[in-house]
Image (cartoon, coloured by chain):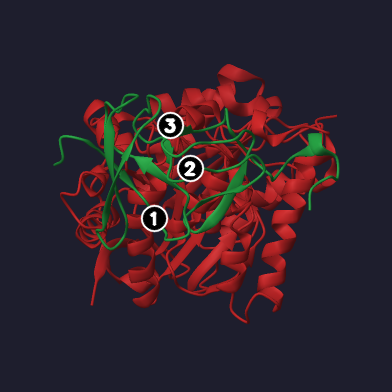
Chain colours: A red, B green
Amino acid sequence: MYSFQGYRRPDGRFGSRNLVAVIPSVICANDVGQAICRQVQGTIGYFHHQGCCQLPLDLKRVTDVLSNLGQSPNVAAALVISLGCEGTDQNRIVEEIRATGKPVEIIRIQELGGTSRAIQAGIDAAGRLVRQISGLQRETADISELTMAIKCGASDTTSGMASNCVIGYVADKLVDLGATVVFGETTEFLGGEHILANRAVGGADGPVGQKIYQIVDEMEKRAMAVGEDMRGGQPTPGNIAGGLSSIEEKSLGAIVKSGHRPIQGVLEYCDRIDGKKGLWIKDSPGREPEILTGMAATGAQCMMFSTGRGAPQGFPSMPVIKICGNPNTYEHMKYDMDLNAGRIILGEKSIEEVGEEAFALLLQVLNGQMTKNEALGYYGSMDIFCLGPVI
Amino acid sequence: MNEEGLALKVDDRDNVATVFSNEVIAGSCIYVRDKKGNQEKIEVRSDIPFGHKVALEDISQGTRIMKYGECIGAASHDIKKGDYVHVHNLEALRGRGDLNGQED
């Protein structure tokens, strides 16, 4: 039996971090939010670029995601920063976070008389919230309380043969222990979707299997609709320099990280996990700022991230553990990479041995040990995946 | 470790292997190791960087290139055993809006 030390939230979920989230309801509130975060210890900010002059479906999407981020278990309290004329529903964000039992406050820049007054009011509010939550103590939580997100980025050919195999090992172990694992990057199912569909509960012809084919088809059609060859963007120039020759090759290496357990279903980008167990897909693009946001908003308390070229970034409220498959990159970037899976390529360790090291590291991180990107403060970039144009 | 370079073949159906040695140059020999640990020595016809692929057999233009036992694209030129295989002679078959419905 495995457990971790987490912060119990009023809704019964456990956080691996205890943070006050500063949530701008629109890009125009970012500067005020950043000033507050610079001043008040224990805060993080979700500085996205959306929230106004978008189609209604995207405004709903942005509202949903910001609300879900505030509800996520690593967040203890929230301060919403509204400009006052944005398209998102900032009152709904406040109400939904408050309904989970967390303290939440809102400030409105236009109403308060502008930037300097809003910053002053925001610092006071954030200070109150930090003092209110910072004395919370960690409690023992069974590992089945964990939702772990998985992702690969800045991949090369070592990813599919080392680091993704390690994450697949951990994913299988977590599912067997009753926990939840979520993977995404629908673009990187292209060429491997039949393998995933065959692992769907109910088989490839069942509703989950068919949904997997459908989301891949929609993603591919979006790229093809503009009449372009995906090769100009996927694989990325870095992937190609690392030896990946096609999206199919990248995909087949990428899906290795999902392990071998049955796929329970497909979550939309705005869906929360809400206690579902086992292995799930989140329909999402592969780019870091959008998928990391989607995973944190799902309710993941931690992410395991595989890389070969060396992707350094994390996420404001979700620790991101970097598993590096390329032994050369690990040596070169060891102050960013948390674990060296390149030893598998060199024949020094087995997938299982490094998998157990990764699992032990995961428990330490859930208990509060900072990942390298957390210690470096490299987690400022995030964004929300929208579907329509900016108008 | 072998003096010669090392390449790994993931699946029996694969016609390429991935080179995991730092200095594999044209004319040198590498050991291609499969999952069971069987090794085959082949001569490399071009320089191949770490993490990039080598052809394990002759692959004629239009033939599917296999890795992980799955198709990763098709040969855009005739490829000889020992050749470097990458975007110059392998083309993706998916996400190809430029082909405009010519895909299967």
> Which residue: 57% across, 57% down?
A98
Please tell me how crowded label 3 is: few (under 14), some (14-19), or many (20+) other residues with Cα within 10 Å.
Answer: many
Residue type at tag 1: Val
Vertical placement of A350 versus A379: above or below?
below
> Which residue: 42% across, 61% down?
B12
Q: Position of residue A56 (x, y in %)?
A: 84, 45
Q: Position of residue A268 (x, y in %)?
A: 67, 59
Please tell me how crowded label 2 is: few (under 14), some (14-19), or many (20+) other residues with Cα within 10 Å.
Answer: many
Are dots 1 and 3 in contact, CB under 8 Å?
no
One can see residue A184 in this view? no
Looking at marks 3 and 2 on the same chain, the residue that comes earlier in the sequence is marked by 2
Q: Locate the C terminus of chain A by quadrant.
A: top right
Residue type at tag 2: Ala
Q: Locate the N terminus of chain A by quadrant.
A: bottom left
Q: Mark 1 — residue?
A: B10
Q: CA distance from mark 3 to mark 2?
A: 37 Å
**Which of A360 and A90 lies nearest the eye of the viewer?**
A360
Please tell me how crowded label 1 is: few (under 14), some (14-19), or many (20+) other residues with Cα within 10 Å.
Answer: many
Vertical placement of B4 versus B101: above or below?
above
Image-based side of A97 in relation to B19, left or right: right
Q: Position of residue B89 (x, y in %)?
A: 58, 32
Q: Mark 2 — residue?
A: A21
Do the residues indicated by labels 2 and 1 lie within the same chain of the protein? no
Label 3 or label 2, whichever lies nearer to me, is: 3
